[in-house]
Amino acid sequence: MQLIPCPNCGRREEIEFHYGGQAHVPYPAEPAALGDAEWADYLFFRDNPKGPFAERWYHSGGCRRWFNAVRDTRSYRFLAVYQPDAPRPDIAQFMAAAPPVAADRASAASSATNAVTR
Amino acid sequence: MTARRLATGGTIDRSVPIPFTFGGVDYTGFAGDTLASALLGAGVGAFGSSVRLGRARGIVSAGTEESSALVQVEAPFAEPMLLATTIELTPGLAARGLTGQGRLATEPDPGRYDARHAHTELLVVGAGAAGLSAALVAARAGASVILIDDDVTVGGSLLDYAETVDGQPGAVWAAAARAELDTFPRVRVLTRTTAFGIYDDGFVLAIEHRSDHVTSTRSRQRIWRIRTQQIVLATGGYERPIVFANNDLPGIMLASAAQVYLERFAVLAGETVVVFTTNDTAYGPAFALAAAGASVTVVDTRPEISAALISGCRTAGITTKSGHAVQAALGDSAVTGVQLTPWPGTTAEPPQEVTLPCDLLLVSGGWNPVLHLFSQATGRLRFDETLATFVATAAIPGVHLAGLAAAQADLAAAFAGGAEAARAALTELSAARAEPGRHRTHSSFEIPTVVSHFALHPIEQVWAIPAPTEFADPDVRFVDVQRDVTVSELLRATGAGLSAMEHVKRYTTLGTALDQGKTSGVIGSGIVAAALGIAVTALGTTTFRPPFTPVSFAVLAGADRGELFDPVRVTAIHDWHVAHGALFEDVGQWKRPWYYPLAGEDLDAAVARECTAARTTVACLDGSTLGKIDVQGPDAGAFLDMLYTNLISSLKVGSVRYGVMCSPDGMVKDDGTVIRLADDHFIVTTTTGNAASILDWMEEWLQTEWPELRVFATSVTEHFVTIPLVGPLSRQVLAILAPELDVSLAAFPFMATRAATIAGIEGRVDRISFSGELAYELNVPAWAGTALWEAVMAAGEPFGITPYGTETMHVLRAEKGYPIIGQDTDGTVSPFDLGLGWAVSQKKVDFIGKRSFARAVNDRADRKELVGLLPVDPTVAIPDGAQLVESADITFPMPMFGHVSSAYRSVALDSHFALALVKGGRARIGQRMFAWSEESLVEVTVADAVLYDSEGARKDG
């Protein structure tokens, strides 16, 4: 049971939160002006990176506020949280500093010296 | 095996005899016994038979690592697959040995289970020498500590191995440590508690056994959900057996276990004892059993034994045979002797086989640190050649190892290691704090002086002894005695090309039994590595997963079962419904009246009567579960314009409008009414089941897309009761209830809302109809709900007012073709598919979903559309969920054109009928189709979704 750092409430149990998908995918200012492909892109297509990813989260069982977070999809660690109207942090800065838990999990899965897999 | 209880010694209470039955035979043990010790004390050493080969099984250990002594408990409550070594003896306990599989209870578990949450700075798992030291150091420094141990009291190995600490028995030191720990208000000591899983961010689950062992009204077991900042794992070690022919015979036991039975339970497990060892740790048990009167021979694989041990053996009258191994155990249902061979054998010199009689064979192949929790916490292991076992690599942040778990070689090292682990934890705690914590990073702790026989070194690495010819086929060298997995089977796996332990495990079932290979796993790795010709460390172990020991579903469910499984929501009028015989339907968490049967009525009869009342006289419903959201603010109208497909901002104050909400993909999300109470004040109603999700939907858009809008959305579902008053006579009843309200058609038109005093209660009346009949929805504060309901029943009584439930509500709305979102729709249905195109604004520049209506997929002629269905024979029911096909000749596969989403019998139509989603449905109106389900095939005519009063004449009465 992971603790998620809500920017308003602090660290809370993950069951209090709902996932909201990729962040920084704004509702188009003029949907009518978009072609079918562009509109489909907004509706259906999202990134799915391995590593730091900017996402939306909703503290539905707490302050009931939406916030954005950068989360490492390999380790599930939250690397940063910020308000929905704040700019996206530079993802590159998180690529370099792989968090320790991520390293443990990733290497545990492939380590020949240990062969502990999940 | 001639185990017997000694007249003196042990920590059992001989003044409290405890009767129990095993295998239908009556026995008596003592307070402080486990089932295993009581049985051994009574001379019972055999425990049913193995699952695959039906071989006899006995007691191997004295604790959680038991691989053999599985029992079925029958009383006080049936539970299968429990370990005799961990069941505390209680009066009336009835159990039997397992032959193969156990038996689940057929009756509900009468036990009470619960859970507690706890937060702490330091969690110490294991209360032996290392764990107690760690807890004392942290407690003295002022930290909050939880110390847990699965034994009945703290002390670990100090309780059972005749070790001396500061000149006193180890148990005395442990008791003093416990007494000191109990003086700290921020320290909690939990015994009979097993930490069985470590999860993210210091989350640890533990199970506490609370009243298995005492007659008590407390909960039987409790789950502790512990959130800790630091963890010290002082989980000790498991002694490891050695594999040889017939190594599964009853009477073969881990060396340390025999000492536990002797020291704690005063049970001498055998009179003529052979101790087979590869290391020094088995000599303590040998000395102890010899001192208790057993005749003991030690067989040691090592060519040389230390002078101190040789001299100790001589003094104790113990014969030693160094450079030998037990090649086979002899006996059929219990061990009667051993066959020895020189070790290591040489081919030049044929082995001289020696046979020794014995009734107890103790084995010690070394020790495995218990690293299950460490491994679960993503700690990595490596094989240590000198200890012949897996040990931890570098510590992981927040998790510290101490004692035997950390492969600290002896008792003195365990005391020191525990203290050191606690200091490391205190330092990390301090470092993690912005401000100084409540505790110090150091406290005084003096390492006690100890006398102990236990030392991990030196050890010879021995996994399996080659079998003598007469025992070779079939192979009876068992690596996993619970799964009957032999050395040959492991070799067959490697011979088949398997080269990873995970694959060998699944191929052979090694380590998949209840004990999860606690004692045998390392041996399996050793044998497989040798077969593959690689180092054990390169092969590794299989994965450690929670739970560490089996945990019942009952305790995981805790109190959340039966009525407490999910919260129950009832309306303010619920008690009236109960008192008047309503049957209830679960709608999400709500209990809603389903129908109100009169004497002798079934569902059909009651619903027919209720429908008739609503369509011909007057009827009323408890509609309080309807979702109600209060939307206020200067931009509320603009916001609702974006949310709904139709125009809301143009709604006049005092008016009501039906609206549809879509997702951005243009599919219907919910529908309901919007009531405008003021320029900046709306009440939005939602489907009962969508009340919470629509509020979330509003919040999502307000917070993430349009934070500039000045709008507040608040759930008011439970603030108001809502009573639809329905039927041609409803106006007359309302006139009585609200004499000051002008109820005339001209003054109070359809889709209007009026503040009113209803039966003396301030409230609101909306002229909304979900039945097509003249109807009013009465809203008053919830606390006045029952008063209003009773007033409605009283005022309506002269008119024959009839309360109705959800079944009648559904029939009435379906006759009118009103869809239920989520029942008649599934997320792929647009407003146009439902025939609600009239509710989609063409004027608005944008609203959520609008752009999607221009997608080509919305123009397809074969979109599924909502239509009505009438059976050709009106007396035949259309099966709910039936598939619609074009031919009565049912063959698979065949084209399917849609499905029945709602089906009822209609009094008004004098026919069964249904709503259905059908490809190109509206173009099929008038055509025949077939509704097929596994139960029946019904010929139907496709009709408009609105089957009753299609001109809408009835809504004005």
Image: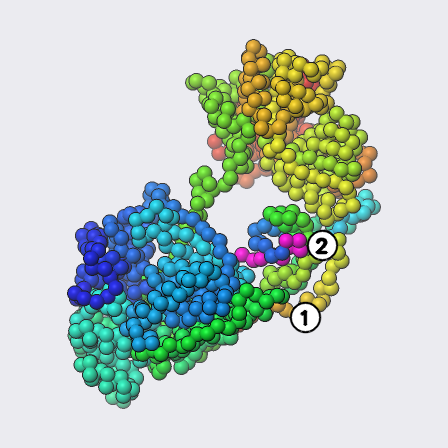
Q: CA distance from mark 2 to mark 1?
A: 24 Å
The image shows residue B864, relative to residue B778, as above or below, that is: below
Q: Which residues are magenta?
A: A1-9
Q: Is residue B373 left or right of residue A99?
A: left
Give the amino acid at mark 1: Ala
Query: Disc 1 designates what residue?
Result: A96
In terms of sequence position, does the residue under pointer 2 or pointer 1 come before the other? 2
Parent chain of label 2: A
Is residue B37 found inside the magenta-colored segment of the image?
Answer: no
Q: In the figure, residue B785 lies in which quadrant? A: top right
Parent chain of label 1: A
Q: Position of residue B67 (x, y in %)?
A: 32, 63
Is B144 or A98 nearer to us in this picture?
B144
The image shows residue B328, relative to residue B555, as above or below, that is: below
Q: Position of residue B523 (x, y in %)?
A: 37, 72
Q: Position of residue B865 (x, y in %)?
A: 66, 32
Tag 2 secondary structure: loop
Q: Is residue B774 visible?
A: yes
Judged by depth in the image, the label closer to the viewer, 2 or 1, is 2
Query: Do callouts 2 and 1 mark residues in contact (Cβ within 8 Å)?
Result: no
Q: Position of residue B74 (x, y in %)?
A: 28, 49
Is B64 or B293 nearer to us in this picture?
B293
Count of marks overlaid on the render: 2
Give the amino acid at mark 2: Gln
Q: Quadrant of the C terminus of chain B?
A: top right
Is B550 or A13 nearer to us in this picture?
A13
At 76% from the left and 30% from the top, the residue drawn is: B678
The image shows residue A116, relative to residue B466, as above or below, that is: above
